[in-house]
Image (spheres, rainbow, N blue to C red):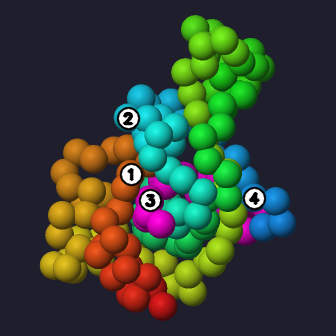
């Protein structure tokens, strides 16, 4: 089992939206960055744990956790001309974009703000905290993941 961090803007899709889809899970689609795509396609696996991080909001923070319930799926939104994430260069024979399905596990009682994570020396080296790291999907080292779970109860 590995830990991951998935960034989302809460006004587009929040931890509450994910929690409302508990029964079947939610396809994590719309990722249009090749590095993040490669992680979703090649490394994120069923059973992995995902920290949900709200970004581009008043208080960026870790807000909950989910589990990957299905890995390595083709993101069908790339083929739909009416979809927000349509990619005219992608074809069913040669898809460019992939997704995974995640299921809500827990919404944290108290989110863990980015500013608090930056002040914790035990989290030094965490990819989210590195200058210039803007990926929407990123790995979280086991030691950092275990610590985050401890901090978040």
Tell which circle, 3 or 4, labels the residue nearer the N-terminal end.
3
Q: Which residue is mark 4?
A: 25
Q: Which residue is mark 2?
A: 35
As helix, strand or loop, the secondary structure at mark 4 comes to: loop
Q: CA distance from mark 3 to mark 4?
A: 17 Å
In the rendered structure, are the residues bearing label 3 and label 1 in contact, judged by CB atoms less than 8 Å apart? yes
Q: Which mark is residue 2?
A: none
As helix, strand or loop, the secondary structure at mark 1 comes to: strand
Q: CA distance from mark 2 to mark 1?
A: 9 Å
Residue 125 or residue 117, whichever sits in front:
125
Task: Let me know if residue 145 appears in the view.
Answer: yes
Q: Which mark is residue 138?
A: 1
Q: Is residue 45 left or right of residue 74?
A: left
Q: Position of residue 147 (x, y in %)?
A: 33, 82
Residues shaded magenta: 1-21
Q: Which residue is mark 3?
A: 5
Task: Let me know if residue 58 appears in the view.
Answer: no
As helix, strand or loop, the secondary structure at mark 3 comes to: strand
């Amino acid at each position: 089992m590995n830990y991951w961090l998935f960034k989302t803007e809460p006004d587009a899709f929040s931890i509450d939206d994910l929690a409302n889809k508990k029964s079947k899970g939610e396809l994590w689609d719309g990722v249009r960055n090749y590095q993040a795509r490669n992680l979703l396609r090649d490394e994120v696996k069923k059973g992995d744990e995902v920290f949900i991080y709200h970004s581009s909001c008043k208080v960026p923070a870790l807000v909950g956790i989910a589990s990957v319930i299905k890995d390595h799926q083709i993101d069908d939104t790339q083929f739909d001309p009416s979809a927000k994430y349509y990619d005219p260069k992608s074809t069913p024979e040669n898809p460019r974009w992939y997704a995974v399905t995640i299921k809500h596990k827990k919404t944290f009682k108290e989110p863990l703000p980015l500013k608090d994570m930056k002040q914790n020396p035990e989290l030094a080296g965490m990819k989210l905290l590195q200058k210039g790291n803007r990926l929407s999907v990123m790995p979280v080292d086991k030691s950092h993941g275990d610590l985050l779970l401890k901090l978040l109860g």
